[in-house]
Amino acid sequence: MADGSGPQRPNTPGNGSSRENTPTGKETRISVASHDDARRTQPTTGVPLVPEDPDNGDAAVVSTATLEGVRVSGEGGRGGGRGSRTSLDLTTGSVPKKLFHQTWPQVAEGMLNVVDQLIDLVWAGLLPGGFRAIAGLGIGQSFTQLAMMARQGLDQSMRAMVSRAVGAKNIPLANHVVHQAFTLNAVYALFTVLIGVLLTDVFLGLIGASEAIRSETALFMRLQFLAIATMSFRNMAGAALQASSEVIVPLKATFITRVLHVVLSPLLMFGPWWFPEMGLAGVAVANVLAQLGGMAINFYVLLNGSSRLHVTMRGYRMDFPLMWRMIKIGVPASVTNAERAISQLVLLGFAAPFGDIALAAFAMTRRMEMLLNFGGMGTGQATGVMVGQNLGAGKPERAKQAVLWGLVYCQVVPAAVRVVTFIAPALLITIFTREPEVVTLGAQLLRLQVIAAFFMVSSMVFQQSFNTAGDTLPPMIVTLIAVWAIEIPLAWFLTHTSVGLLGVGYAAIAGMAFRNVCYVPYYFTGRWLRVKVI
């Protein structure tokens, strides 16, 4: 993008070659006879190659950017970082085997996140506020989750661009994309923290929380908004590494983050020895400190060049055309994620009139939803990265195979947990509270969530795959219809009948099933394989 005009695509005439002017002014012939030949005949500067698809001979549907001073790199991070022993080439070899190696660390990350949140519920249940503290924890996390899920559109667009660049063996371009993503993330984090801290009381009033719950929640929620800054940079750095096939380092960072959080939370909540007794707010303070630890690990690897990516401030410049393209790709993905989070807040509002016990049961089971879906997000992200890299390498058929295998993995991984939860939901809930009414209602809601989870994880794989292919608009439209035309209206209607609060669970099943009805035929159209990303 030396001319500032944004991403450009090289000419590829029908004779299988193209001519491009390098920054030196000399014309360089680029042969695109085959993907392997292309690697050997790429110019050292200028427009990176668009490889051919070796499966069907069609030109790969990826447009790459001309970057001033950027050189096309070879395998394993040459021209970028020094390369990582744990980074896989996802464009060759067995699809299920490569996808498995990409998936299990991300599934493990998801499980660590689930365990961490469930432990928070245990500690909250031991506070003097009891089930009201549990309700406050769920409400506060729902609002901060909205802010984080809306931000994930930046992760999605960055993941789409980085995976394409890595698949095309252009590591300097991937590094440049990460620079721009961090710049956008800094602006978003500052804006979100300020809005969240200043409007906490307004948000709590919007959902109709009782005074008792508001007093438990307000400080915790403000501190959680502060944690968004550190959390967002840890997540974005981890997403960049994952997009380059480096999945072990983000797993280590998440492990350290969760261990720190689990250790610090009870110390800051209950105040033994010389620690302050902060109550529910101690969870948020522990989260801020723990996220800093995980962020440091991810950034260390990105900065020292031990992975494929090597992100330093040397040569950094703000690339507004690339950032604008990133925003255009990311906004629909942000809306998709935010719609899900907003619907949770609306449903909290539906639960509030049923009283604090119902609100506690609903908030608790929504936190436990991650336990039932933990394989979905990790598998979806891994599948999406494999899709992006193979599209960058000009292998769309291999990208399609990755999605099919992802659908298999996302159902197999959490199967045992779902069976146990469906058979004995009350046993699981009594880990967090023994309030009889909360246990009874929570068990009924949890069974419905098991059914919804079956549809939800497969929709996650489709959504992540389409998003990382750069096709973020269709998932947004499908989610918009599923949430606002099906789930919310149906939940409102059913909660005003004898079904009561259980209507929320039935509505969730309908909304998730609808997503799959839309995603399956769209997958077979193949339109998502032909989206221009960089």
Image (spheres, grey):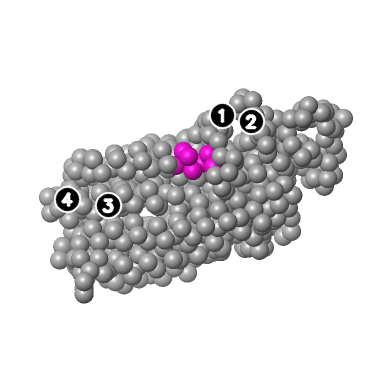
* Marks 2,1: beta carbons within 8 A: yes
Q: Residue, x 24% and y 54% (percent of image)? A: 220
Q: Secondary structure at mark 4?
A: helix
Question: Mark 3 highlights which residue?
Answer: 223
Assess whether residue 181 is covered by the magenta stretch.
yes
- Per the model, the C-alpha gap separating discs 2 and 1 is 8 Å
- Per the model, the C-alpha gap separating discs 3 and 2 is 40 Å
- Per the model, the C-alpha gap separating discs 4 and 1 is 44 Å
Q: Which mark is residue 321?
A: 1
Quadrant where the image shows the C terminus: top right
Report if residue 13 is visible in the image: yes
> What's the residue type where badge 2 is placed?
Met
* Image spot of residue 287 (x, y percent): 34, 59
Q: Secondary structure at mark 1?
A: helix
In this view of the protein, which residue sits in the foreground, 257 or 357?
A: 257
Mark 4, Cα crowd under 10 Å, few <14 / some 14-19 / many 20+, is: many
> What's the residue type where badge 3 is placed?
Leu
Question: Mark 4 highlights which residue?
Answer: 214
Q: Comparing marks 4 and 3, which lies closer to the viewer? A: 3
Q: Which mark is residue 404?
A: none
Relative to 226, is 489 above or below? Answer: above
Q: Comparing marks 4 and 2, which lies closer to the viewer? A: 2
Q: Comparing marks 4 and 1, which lies closer to the viewer? A: 1
Question: Mark 2 highlights which residue?
Answer: 1
